[in-house]
Image (cartoon, grey):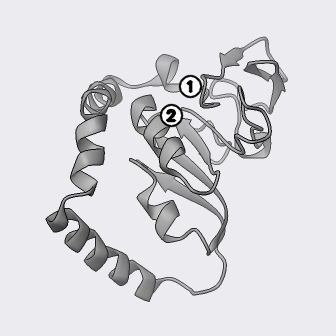
Amino acid sequence: MSLAVNRDADPHYPNVPLDLLRCPVTGSELYRKDSELVAIESDRHYRLDLHGIPPFAEEFCSEDARIQQAHYEIIAEAYAANLGYPHTKAYMAYLDEALLKEIDPLRLGTVAELCRGHGEAFRLLARRVGRGIGVDVSVAMLCKAVTASRRHFVVRSGGCDDAATGNG
């Protein structure tokens, strides 16, 4: 899993909203020490990459998640290119309109975007989301999302079946 927020706070490692994350092994709170996150109740350390993403998935992916991760690491560039195709834009506009009709027009508070790709949902809902955490098994996809985001959201890598947010 991974995470990135407020890149302006520290050009090398972002200000990580630790209240949204937990150690994937112990479930304990994490604190930031230099370029890594450390579990309070154990000696577990998780490095932050240059985008501020702690790649929890490196250690905790199921075999199926590793297959998916390898696939998306390879196609991350093609995925981004596909988002710009006219037929993809038309399809996404249709889905976006349907989603916006269904959700409350008020602020959504803290929102999780699972299998986040390039963060399309957060960009669509940017004015409604108070704070967001994006989860994806692919660090390459998360890096694209962080780079493409106009706002800064939390990003973490890992399968959707783990409990590193403390809510699982």
Residue 94, compared with residue 123, is above or below; it is below
Callout 2 amino acid: Ser
Residue drawn at the location 56% of the way across and 86% of the way down: 104
Badge 1 element: loop
Q: Residue 145 vs residue 5: left or right? A: left
Mark 2: few/some/many CA within 10 Å (<14, 14-19, 20+) = many
Q: Earlier in the sequence, mark 1 or mark 2?
A: 1
Residue at mark 1: 56
Please provide percent x and percent y for residue 38: 78, 20
Callout 1 amino acid: Phe
Residue 23, compared with residue 150, is above or below; it is above
Residue drawn at the location 32% of the way across and 22% of the way down: 63
- Quarter assignment of residue 7: top right
Residue at mark 2: 157
Q: Nearer the viewer, residue 44 or 153?
A: 153
Residue drawn at the location 21% of the way across and 51% of the way down: 82
Please provide percent x and percent y for residue 33: 83, 20
Q: Residue 81 vs residue 150: left or right? A: left
- Quarter assignment of residue 35: top right
Q: Nearer the viewer, residue 112 or 129?
A: 129
Residue 150, compared with residue 143, is above or below; it is below
Please provide percent x and percent y for residue 124: 47, 69
Cα–Cα gap, marks 1 and 2: 6 Å
Mark seen at residue 99: none
How many marks on residues?
A: 2
- Quarter assignment of residue 73: top left
Image quadrant in which the N terminus is located: top right
Badge 2 element: strand
Q: Nearer the viewer, residue 29 or 31?
A: 31
Contact flag, marks 1 and 2 (Cβ < 8 Å): yes
Residue that lies at the very extreme toward the left in this rendered image: 87
Residue drawn at the location 44% of the way across and 36% of the way down: 159
